[in-house]
Image (cartoon, grey):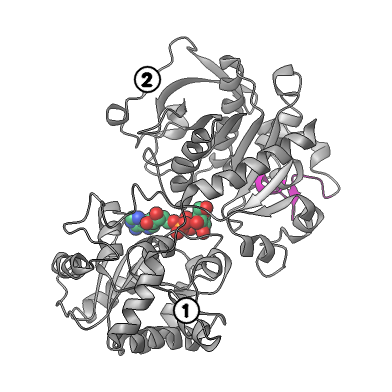
């Protein structure tokens, strides 16, 4: 199969969250299974061209892409995903993509990703490469399935092209004013009378994809069920229920080349399930880095996250006083909403012996926290998949999570499993979205920590979990085939 994988962020070139991790790993696994996969992404100003060997595609030259009736002169660069043969094509239009941030609140945010989606189809045409499937991800590529079926349908190249749309986060839908129809050259007929691209009076990129993609999936089985409900769908439950026959859940994998305590390039001390000595040394190193007193027998709880409401920080805010009196320490790495950035900064400055924070984005620190912390806290309100709890399992850092989405599919509560007569629990989880449930789970974890044998068993159960990409890649191939079946 020929598969075009389209993503607004791809590791190692650009990243704001887990989508980038997926886009840097899944195409490589699919290619390993014998398919021709090409990745398409914007060329942001923040990408290190030298380091990643981006090559200008002179044979394509200037490539006009029409947005708002104007032909924008774009250019194309190419590289590969490191240690693979998967080609990555970068759409280059500096007025749109040379900004401080990957996503902005600027007035032309819709224009930027209309250009990206159309630009992808323009490159594919110039490659004369017939994609069997175009795999789109999140709202930034939401109009692409519509473009394939309509605007670019004049080109025979796309006559049998199927589209798969993956929802990584339903909270971000790409909602814009009605004038966006003209910018993207989307027919008004798709908007009026509650049409395919309309939602609450706005043009909604995600809804367009949910209407036009041949197959839809999200990144865990539980989340695939949750988004059919009003509570979790952010308004998309009607269209999703309508498409429920075409909706699937596939759990993300993990790139264990990048996330493995036995070989992690960022760790001062490597360790394994058989020999955990290095973990304690990493904890000491981490505490030093953060100026936190090192206590080998007091649990250190790590948080690494976008600081957004989605991640359950309102629960932490409500319980912070209680949490600050528990016999544990905290180390927090994150950036995002000002309120939560300030909350953690203040917590750390008032209780320097208890908590430390780094407000910002820092990949190296993310690895160090995964290795040095004893527990990892992720009380998300909703979580399509979640990667950090899966990294945590591998690093022997016991996850404490809210039982939702991918968190529910990866973390098994120790006490709950014990009550069923099983000793395969690998973490702690709670269901009700309230501060009491959260602090109860944290306290249960702290209690177990003091029993060395129990704690080692929980760590070992987690470290032996295997979430390699290969398994998920095989499932994606089945979905590609299903999608192709629908256009034949
Ligand atoms: P989401 O995509 O919703 O942000 P995921 O758990 O899927 O959540 O993925 C988050 C990814 O981003 C992980 O690889 C995590 O390590 C990384 N990450 C999040 N915040 C930071 C940060 N402040 N610094 C470094 N890495 C971060
Ligand atoms: C999203 C989700 C996260 C998921 C990631 C990759 O941003 O919030 O749960 O792991 O995408 O699929």
Location of residue 424 with respect to 156 vertically, above or below: below
Whether residue 198 appears in magenta in the rendering, the answer is: yes
> What range of the chain is rendered magenta?
194-207
Q: Which residue is mark 2?
A: 55
Quadrant containing the C terminus in the rendered view: top right
Spot occupied by residue 250 in the image (x, y as percentages of width and height): 60, 53
Residue in the foreground of this view, choosing between 26 and 182? 26
Location of residue 243 with respect to 112 vertically, above or below: below
Whether residue 409 appears in magenta in the rendering, the answer is: no
Residue under the point 59% across and 32% down: 117
Left or right of residue 366: residue 19: right
- Which of the 4 image quadrants contains residue 169? bottom right
| Label 1 SS | helix
- Note whether residue 4 is visible: yes
Residues at badges 2 and 1 in contact (C-beta under 8 Å)? Answer: no
- Which of the 4 image quadrants contains residue 460? bottom left
Q: Which residue is mark 1?
A: 315
């Amino acid at each position: 199969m020929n598969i075009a994988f389209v993503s607004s962020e791809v590791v190692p070139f650009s990243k704001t969250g887990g989508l980038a991790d997926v886009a840097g790993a899944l195409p490589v696994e699919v290619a390993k299974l014998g398919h021709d996969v090409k990745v398409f992404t914007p060329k942001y100003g923040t990408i290190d061209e030298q380091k990643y060997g981006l090559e200008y595609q002179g044979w394509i030259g200037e490539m006009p892409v029409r947005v708002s009736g104007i032909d924008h002169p774009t250019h194309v660069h190419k590289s590969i995903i490191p240690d693979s043969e998967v080609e990555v094509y970068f759409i280059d239009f500096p007025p749109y993509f040379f900004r401080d941030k990957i996503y902005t609140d600027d007035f032309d945010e819709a224009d930027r990703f209309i250009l990206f989606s159309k630009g992808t189809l323009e490159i594919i045409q110039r490659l004369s490469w017939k994609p069997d499937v175009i795999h789109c991800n999140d709202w930034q590529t939401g109009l692409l399935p519509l473009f394939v079926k309509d605007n670019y349908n004049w080109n025979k190249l796309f006559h049998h092209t199927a589209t798969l749309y993956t929802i990584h986060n339903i909270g971000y839908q790409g909602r814009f004013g009605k004038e966006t129809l003209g910018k993207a050259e989307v027919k008004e007929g798709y908007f009026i009378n509650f049409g395919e691209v309309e939602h609450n009076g706005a043009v909604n990129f995600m809804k367009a994809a949910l209407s036009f993609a041949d197959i839809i999936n999200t990144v865990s089985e539980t989340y695939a069920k949750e988004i059919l409900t009003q509570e979790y769908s952010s308004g998309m439950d009607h269209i999703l229920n309508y498409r429920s026959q075409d909706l699937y859940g596939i759990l993300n994998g993990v790139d264990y080349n990048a996330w493995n305590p036995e070989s992690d390039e960022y760790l001062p001390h490597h360790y394994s399930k058989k020999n955990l000595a290095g973990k304690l040394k990493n904890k000491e190193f981490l505490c030093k880095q953060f100026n936190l007193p090192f206590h080998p027998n007091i649990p250190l709880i790590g948080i690494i996250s976008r600081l957004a409401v989605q991640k359950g920080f309102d629960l932490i805010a409500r319980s912070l006083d209680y949490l600050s009196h528990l016999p544990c320490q905290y180390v927090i790495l994150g950036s995002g909403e000002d309120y939560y950035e300030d909350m953690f900064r203040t917590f750390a400055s008032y209780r320097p012996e208890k908590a430390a924070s780094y407000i910002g984005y820092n990949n190296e620190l993310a690895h160090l926290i995964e290795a040095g912390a004893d527990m990892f806290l992720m009380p998300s309100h909703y979580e399509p998949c979640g990667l950090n709890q899966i990294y945590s399992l591998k690093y022997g850092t016991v996850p404490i999570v809210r039982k939702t989405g991918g968190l529910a599919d990866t973390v098994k509560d120790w006490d709950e499993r014990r009550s069923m007569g099983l000793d395969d629990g690998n973490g702690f989880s709670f269901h009700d979205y309230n501060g009491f449930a959260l602090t109860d789970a944290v306290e249960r974890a702290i209690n177990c920590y003091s029993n060395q044998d129990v704690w080692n068993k929980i760590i070992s159960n987690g470290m032996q979990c295997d979430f390699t990409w290969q398994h998920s890649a095989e499932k994606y191939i089945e979905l590609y085939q299903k999608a192709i079946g629908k256009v034949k």
